[in-house]
Each structure stands twice: as structure tokens, then as C-alpha cells.
Amino acid sequence: MAVDLKDKTAPHLPRRPFAKCLLFPQVDEASWRLGASNQSVTSDFILVGLFSHTGPHLVLLSLVVTVFATGLLGNTTLLLLIHADSRLHVPMYFLLSQLALLDIGFPLVTVPKMVAGFLQGESSISFAGCAAQMFFLMLMGVSEGVLLALMSYDRYVAVCHPLHYAVLMRRQVCLLLAGTSWLSGVLVASVQTCVALRLPCCASRTVGHWACELPALLRLSCADTSAYERALSGSGALILLLPLALLGASYGRVLGAVLRMRSAEACRQALATCSSHLLVVGLFYGAAVFMYMVPGAYHGPYRDSVVSLFYSLVTPTLNPLIYSLRNREVRLALVKVMGRGGSRSRR
């Protein structure tokens, strides 16, 4: 049965700002007791995990851990290959290396904590840890969304303006694109985290989510958060829809150029590549739009937890497979590095 995390009917529950009562907890607040249940309240949050200790859920947890390990291995391998092979020192692979960095950090922020909480039987997290988790989740998410849009511009230039590619995607432009994505994430995460932590909170420390994500923490607030939720939806429209517009325009031009190709085989391969890219982008942006732009009435703890898995775990695992490891240059680099390692071991 779903639990209403916004329940404010508990007796003798003073309102306390997150930042004041948790970041700098006082002794009397740490030993604070609920009048109704005589249960001590600490400054830690309790995260509600996705899985219980039953057979089917153990299988699902094993699947999550396998996906996490696969994504970590794929993205780390891609980073090492790009660094080791000079043939991959080109704009497209530079941007892919930034995507791999984000895809390594994204699941590392949440999945190890979730698994540790499952093994320990209870997943508690300190206020500082919760704030850091919320900040880095938002940083990684916004940066990746912007980077995916900028990468579509790179593909547009490569397909539609190949003769000008070296000029339009020179080193300074690549650094500007990467810096823009990271700076966007830092700015949005800083503002949203600071604002969220100033909202007054109830005594409940149970977060209806497997991670400290902003929509889940808003349900703990005793204040009316409707104005902030509207502002969050508005900022989400700016942060998500602008990159989506760039993605749509870039891939629209790319598909138009592909369909005009005279070679049926080249056209088929290009369409297969574009469709796989759009599938990953659709999973990432679809889940993010639901979490940060859809009104709160359509949200629920379990539904939000499942949706957030798509952009925090599934797409980081798919990205190296879709964008890179299928490419001939990456496969050749992998064979070269493995051959070099084999020859050293024989010596």
C-alpha cells in the first residue's frame, strides 16, 4: 500500500528548515522525541529501497548490480581506449569521453549506496550525504542532457557540412561545448539544491525513493511547495526543452541528408545508427521530463523510483554500447590495445 509522505497530521511536530536543523544539528534537536511514539529523531534520512528480501527481488537486485557493473566497465574501457589510441583523438570521441565520465559518475552516486542499504537491512543517509547526492545527481543529469544535445550538433556538422568539419569543430569549439555542459550542470544543481534545503521539513525522515532526489525530498516539506514545484517545472522546460529542440533540429537535418543518399546500404546503416541514438535520447529525456516537468499529482514514490532508474542507470549503460563500442574505429582500437597487452604478457 502506498504511503502518503506528505502527511502532516502527526502531533507535536515543529517545522524546521532543512539547512538549519540538519546541516548544523543541536544536541537538544538530536535527542528530540516524538510525543506519539517516543521514538528518537536523528538528522539522518531513511531511503526506501526498491527491493525487499524476497526471491524475485533478489533476482532484480542482481540484475541492477550486473547492469551497473556492465556500464562501469563499458564507460571505463571507452575512456581508456580514447586516451590510448591517437586515431580517436577527434572531436566526436572527445565529446564521447565527456559522456563516459558523466555515465561513470551518474550511477556511482546512488547505486552503491542502494546496494549497501539493502545488504544492511536499512538505508540511512546523513543530511550532508543526502544534500551531496541530490547535488551530484542534478549536476550529472543536467550536464548529460546538454551534452547529448551538443553531440547531435557534432553529428549534424559531420553529415551535412563535412568539408567544414575541421573548422566548425576545432579544439576550442570542443572545449567550449564540453565546458558549457559541465557549467550548466553546476549552476542548476547549485541553485536547486540551495533552494530545496531551505524549505521547512516535517519530523518524518523517510524519503519515498531509493536516492535523495529533489521531487522525493519535496514531499517531506511541511510548507506549501506548489509555487516551488511550478518554478521547478518552468526551469525544467528551459533546461530540458531547449536541448530537445536542438536535438530535434540536428537529427532532423541529419535524417534529411541521409535519406538523400544514393547508396542504399549507406542509407540503411545511417538510419540504424540514428534510430539507436534517438532511442537512448528518448529514454533519457522521457524519464527526465516525467520527473521534473510533470505535475506532482501524477507522481508516486514507487513510480518515481522506477522512472529514475532509466536515466541514472539504464542509459549510462547503453550509451557506450550505442555511441561507441559499435563503431569500427573503437573496435580496432580495442583489438590494438588487447594485442599490445598480449604481446607484453608473452615476453
Image (cartoon, helix red, strand yellow):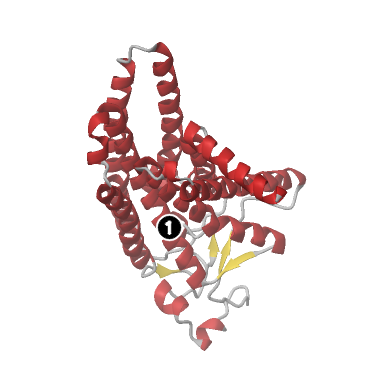
- In the depicted view, which residue is nearer to us: 339 or 254? 339
Classify residue 119 as left or right of residue 157.
Answer: right
Classify residue 54 as left or right of residue 27.
Answer: right
Question: What residue appears at the point 26 percent right and 35 percent down from the top-left corner?
Answer: 165
Q: Quadrant of residue 225?
A: bottom left
Please indicate, yes or no, whether residue 293 appears anywhere in the rendered image: no
Question: What residue appears at the point 42 percent right and 72 percent down from the top-left corner?
Answer: 18
Classify residue 235 as left or right of residue 197.
Answer: left
Question: Horizontal and vertical percent for residue 236?
Answer: 32, 48
Pick out the residue farthest to the right: 55
Question: Horizontal and vertical percent for residue 52?
Answer: 70, 52
Please indicate, yes or no, whether residue 254 appears anywhere in the rendered image: yes
- Compared to residue 134, the image places residue 344 above or below, namely above
- In the depicted view, which residue is nearer to us: 63 or 263? 263
- Compared to residue 140, the image places residue 286 above or below, namely above
Question: What residue appears at the point 57 percent right and 76 percent down from the top-left corner?
Answer: 41
Disc 1 target residue: 214
Mark 1: which amino acid? Leu
Question: What residue appears at the point 50 percent right and 75 percent down from the top-left corner?
Answer: 12
Question: Horizontal and vertical percent for residue 15?
Answer: 42, 73
